[in-house]
């Protein structure tokens, strides 16, 4: 019986692993030691849960702010399309309408321009609805105990 084989067998690492932005794994105890120094309290599970809660909260805030920015941009697009449509409705059909493309203006027939603005308005409304739903899904996707921590 070869004892050297049995003694050289390593025990698997059972500590929690997280992933950094580059996709590399980092040991949670190393993260906690960086956060709290080399003290003995850095390895306790309560500190790990606090650290993970803070990390989760920051990621949630980041996602929420990105959704809010996209939502504001779509609301601006919707309002611009709505106001353009209102102004176009006041014009007669024989008026010339021009579309701004970069530094130039292109002559467009009024019905074509109105269809384009209606499509832009509808697309903005659909995007706003989906962004609002995704914001709700971010919150609902969390476990109830995570919401209590946050």
Image: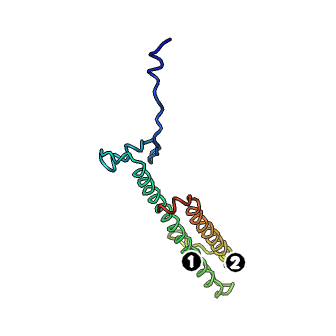
Provide residue 86's location: percent of width, then percent of height.
62, 84
Vertical side of 116 occupied by 139: above or below: above
Vertical side of 38 occupied by 54: above or below: below
Residue at 60% over, 76% down: 81
Provide residue 8's location: percent of width, then percent of height.
44, 21
The reply to whether dot 2 and dot 1 touch (C-beta < 8 Å) is no
Local crowd at mark 2 within 10 Å, few (<14), some, or many (≥20)?
Answer: few
**Residue tagged 1:** 80
Give whichever of 115, 57 is nearer the camera.
Answer: 57
Provide residue 88's location: percent of width, then percent of height.
63, 83
Residue at 68% over, 74% down: 115
Give whichever of 110, 50 is nearer the camera.
Answer: 50
Provide residue 12's location: percent of width, then percent of height.
48, 32
Local crowd at mark 1 within 10 Å, few (<14), some, or many (≥20)?
Answer: some
- Residue 7 relative to residue 113: left or right: left
Q: CA distance from mark 2 to mark 1?
A: 18 Å
Give whichever of 135, 129 is nearer the camera.
Answer: 135
- Badge 2 marks a residue whose secondary structure is helix
- Badge 1 marks a residue whose secondary structure is helix
Q: Which label was assigned to residue 111? A: 2
């Amino acid at each position: 019986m070869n004892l050297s084989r049995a003694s050289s067998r390593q025990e698997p690492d059972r500590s929690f692993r997280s992933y950094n932005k580059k996709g590399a794994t980092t040991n949670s105890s190393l993260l906690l030691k960086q956060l709290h120094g080399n003290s003995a309290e850095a390895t306790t599970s309560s500190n790990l849960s606090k650290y993970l809660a803070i990390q989760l909260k920051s990621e949630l805030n980041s996602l929420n702010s990105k959704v809010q920015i996209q939502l504001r941009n779509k609301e601006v697009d919707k309002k611009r399309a709505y106001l353009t449509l209102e102004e176009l409705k006041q014009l007669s059909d024989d008026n010339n309408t021009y579309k701004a493309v970069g530094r130039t203006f292109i002559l467009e027939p009024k019905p074509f321009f109105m269809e384009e603005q209606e499509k832009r308005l509808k697309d903005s409304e659909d995007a706003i609805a989906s962004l609002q739903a995704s914001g709700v899904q971010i919150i609902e996707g969390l476990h109830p105990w995570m919401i209590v921590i946050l």
